[in-house]
Each structure stands twice: as structure tokens, then as C-alpha cells.
Image: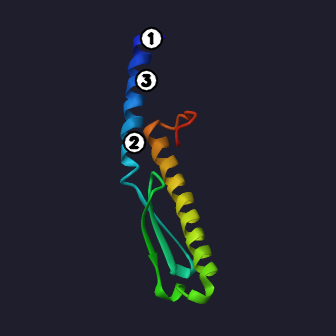
Amino acid sequence: MDIQYLMRQAKKLEKAMADAKEQLAELSVEAESGGGLVKVTMNGKCEVTRLLVDPKAVDPADKAMLEDLVTAAVNAAVEKARAAADEHMARATGGIKIPGVAG
């Protein structure tokens, strides 16, 4: 095997991974809970970019319900964001499983 060829391939893979990681911030997923009472938008880096709470979900007498709805929506968004990031990184690496890297 040609070591120079392997080095070039490794550099290409490294660049593809770096580009893909940068693009994760542009990826967007949305999740909701309570039948849409709480909606969370998150990017591919698992950063919440938007949180919407329907006024119907705000009941001062039942603060715990709102907390549960927000928690559920955020957790669902994290799951979707991770899955989308894994898929995105898998495309960037050609499906190669690299420890410590999404995909």
C-alpha cells in the first residue's frame, strides 16, 4: 500500500470532518411535547435555539406540569439533534466509525 496515498486520504477525511462539524450549527431540528404546547428548536450541536411555550401551558398552580413539558421537549430535541448529527457525520466520513466522533 502506498503510504502517500493513505496520508492524502487521511487529510481529505480530516477536512471533511472539520467541514461537517462546522455545518452542524446550521442543522436544525424541532421537537414538541404536550401536543405542541411546548416546542424546542435545536441545532446539530445540541444548542437550544428557540423555545416556545403556549400560554395554555402556563398555569401558576401547576408549575410542575410546565417543567415536565419543557424537559420532555428538550430531551426529544436532543435525541433528534444527535440522530441528525450522527447521520451528517456518517455522510462526511463515508460511514467510517471513528471513536469520539458523531456518526
How crowded is the residue under tag 1: few (<14 C-alpha within 10 Å), some, or many (20+)? Answer: few
What amino acid is labelled 2 in the image? Ala
> Type of residue at label 3?
Ala
Q: Residue at x 37, y 31 (%)?
A: 15
Give the spatial CA distance, label 2 vs label 3: 15 Å
Of pointers 2 and 3, the one earlier in the residue sequence: 3
Q: Taking 13 as reference, is 25 above or below it? A: below
Q: In the image, what residue occupies the spot 51% across and 79% down?
A: 36
Identify the element where label 2 is drawn.
helix
Image location of residue 43, percent across then percent down: 43, 57
The percent coordinates of residue 17 (x first, y second) are 42, 36
Q: Residue at x 52, y 47 (%)?
A: 86
Residue identified by numbered label 2? 20
Q: Residues within 10 Å of mark 2 (few under 14, many from 20)?
A: some
Residue 52 is left or right of residue 75, and the answer is left
Q: Which residue is mark 3?
A: 10
Vertical side of 95 occupied by 77: above or below: below
The label shown at residue 3 is: 1
Tag 3 near tag 1, CB within 8 Å: no
Q: Earlier in the sequence, mark 2 or mark 1?
A: 1
Please state which amino acid type lies under the numbered disc 1: Ile
Expressed as whole percent of the image width and height from the top left, the position of residue 97 reads 56, 35
Q: Residue at x 46, y 36 (%)?
A: 93
Q: CA separation, marks 3 and 1?
A: 10 Å
Mark 1 and mark 2 in contact (Cβ < 8 Å)? no
